[in-house]
Amino acid sequence: MDSGNMMIAYVITKRGNRSFWNRVGAAFHNVDGSINVHLDALPVDGQIQLRDYMPRESEDDRADYESRPGPAKVRPRARAKKPRSKASKARPRVRR
């Protein structure tokens, strides 16, 4: 199958200020210019976003990306101890 004629079908759901992209199927261009759409789920609002298919990176591409120089890795700082207040240093009161 030629990935150049393939598209991915998504449903975009908005909740609050975030958007969630859910893959619901695929679409294929035919020789005559028509498009076949194969859906695994139907959107509630009736809207589908079609995007060109982009193959995922291979392991070699990912290793090459991870070996690129980037920001230095910084170790997290140890938390400074808070000074104790005078009240916490006082001895507890004993009731008689």
Image (cartoon, rainbow, N blue to C red):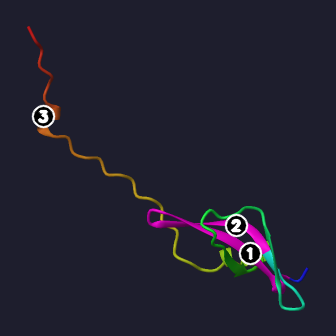
Q: How far across and how far down the image is residue 89, in percent?
A: 16, 33
Q: Nearer the viewer, residue 83 or 5?
A: 5
Tell me the kind of residue under disc 1. Ile
In terms of depth relative to the viewer, which is nearer, 86 or 58? 58
Nearer to us in this view, 22 or 86: 22
Horizontal arrangement in the rendering, residue 29 relative to residue 92 (left or right): right
Per the rendering, the mark at residue 23 is 2
Q: Residue 87 carries which label?
A: 3
Asked if the magenta segment contains residue 11, the reply would be yes
- Residue 42 disc label: none
Residue reaching furthest to the top: 96
- Please say whether residue 12 is one of the residues in the magenta stretch: yes
Q: Between disc 2 and disc 1, whose residue precedes?
A: 1
Mark 2–mark 1 contact, CB under 8 Å? yes
Tell me which label, 1 or 3, sits earlier in the chain: 1
The quarter holding residue 2 reads bottom right
* Secondary structure mainly formed by the magenta segment: strand
Could you tell me which quadrant the N terminus lies in? bottom right
Residue at image position (88%, 92%) is 32
Q: What element carries label 1?
A: strand
Circle 1 residues within 10 Å: few <14, some 14–19, many ≥20: many
**3 or 2: mark nearer the eye:** 2
* Residue at image mark 1: 8
Q: Which amino acid does label 2 sit on?
A: Arg
Q: Earlier in the sequence, mark 3 or mark 2?
A: 2
In the drawing, does residue 63 fall left or right of residue 70? right
Seen in the image, is 35 located left or right of residue 90?
right
Q: What stretch is highlighted in magenta?
A: 3-26
Residue furthest out toward the bottom: 32
| C-alpha gap between disc 3 and disc 2 | 59 Å
